Image (cartoon, rainbow, N blue to C red):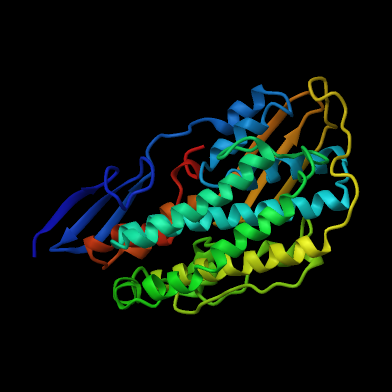
Amino acid sequence: MRELELYFGPQHLGMVGNFSITLNVEGDRIVKATANPGFLHRGFEKLMEQRTWIQNFPLVCRINVVEPDHMELMYAMAVEKLAGIEVPERARFIRSIYLELARIGSHLFGLWAYANMLGFDTVANWAMYHRDLVLDLFEELTGGRVYHIYIWPGGVRRDFPEGFKDRIINTLHTIGSCVPDYDNTFFNNRVFYKRAKNIGKITCEEAKRMGAVGQVLRATGMKQDIRKTEPYAAYDQVDWEIPVRTDGDAYSRIWVVRDEMIESVHMIFKLLDKMPEGEVYNKIPNPFKWKIPDKDAYVRCESSRGELGLYLVSNGGDKPYRAHFRTPSYNHGLTILEKALENESIADVGNIMISLYITAPEIDR
């Protein structure tokens, strides 16, 4: 059969941001895929070298629009490590609760995108509505719905307002009560099984070799989570499980996302029960004249997409000397996507891409 070159995206529903893929196809089967992430948020890491330590917080949030909160955490943790700043115990719990709410919101956004891709519009609308409930909490706590700039070196900007704990619980109960509806309408639906089972499959060895993290790695059977292996914030203060699947296909990856949302809800309840009283912020020097000691630091955490890392270098001045992020979408959106698309159908390009949980800004930074 004759081989054709097909340009896929970025206007397609299954693409993310300005991403596009060049496909070499025979009929509707993909022979070769070449990812093109395009140009979106260029130069963030270099721009950070031109701004003071505190001015970079609004900037790092833009590296992942869907989930900016873990970017805040990474930068704050790196600055704390460089400057030797301790975080109060209550602030550690607040950070964990805040980050798990962000994880739930990010997973609901991912479910919205994936359900839309497969034509489950009702499920997509449910997911977006429930994400809006999480954003309502962020708006009350931080004043912003998308970018929050809530985590700072030494803790968080402010404590929970009066009654906020109860509003978190009520919101999570509202979302949790709809899990049977999600299961009956989508996760246990034969259409989802037929469209996602054995699609975009990678083995555990391939996933490790190509740098897979997060759901992409856990969907191949590997229990790997930075919150367990290198606990930060208050993740070592409560018991929780790492959801895994074993088949390494789109079906397994989306099931892991579903299970992680439920685990995050349970984790927040446990953190709220154990959260101590006390300060939420350790005072730092004047942020506009602050100079960090001459040293470097590497920190990492588990974002909703997997391992997120930051290497930050100080030369003793009032600005970072070098900054470099290790983002999950870089490997998922380039190396792994091209491998997962081989021998698949054109109709499953968006299906596979969204199941790999790719966000374009994380690649072009």
Q: In the image, is 128 to the left or to the right of 264?
A: left
Residue at 27 percent of width and 46 percent of height: 9
Q: In the image, is 115 to the left or to the right of 233?
A: left
Query: Vertically, is 85 above or below 134?
Result: above
**Residue 271 screen position, x and y as percent:** 76, 62
Kindly give the residue lying farthest to the left in the view shown. 1
**Residue 49 screen position, x and y as percent:** 66, 26
Residue at 68 percent of width and 62 percent of height: 226
Residue at 63 percent of width and 72 percent of height: 242
Q: Quadrant of residue 292 in the image?
A: top right
Q: How many badges with numbers are in the image? A: 0
Q: Is residue 93 visible?
A: yes
Kindly give the residue lying farthest to the top in the view shown. 289
Q: In the image, is 313 to the left or to the right of 68?
A: right
Q: Nearer the viewer, residue 196 or 128?
A: 128
Q: Nearer the viewer, residue 166 or 286?
A: 166
**Residue 88 screen position, x and y as percent:** 88, 48
Residue at 49 percent of width and 67 percent of height: 178
Q: Is residue 301 visible?
A: no
Image quarter hosting the N terminus: bottom left
Query: Vertically, is 260 above or below 138?
Result: below
**Residue 322 screen position, x and y as percent:** 67, 33
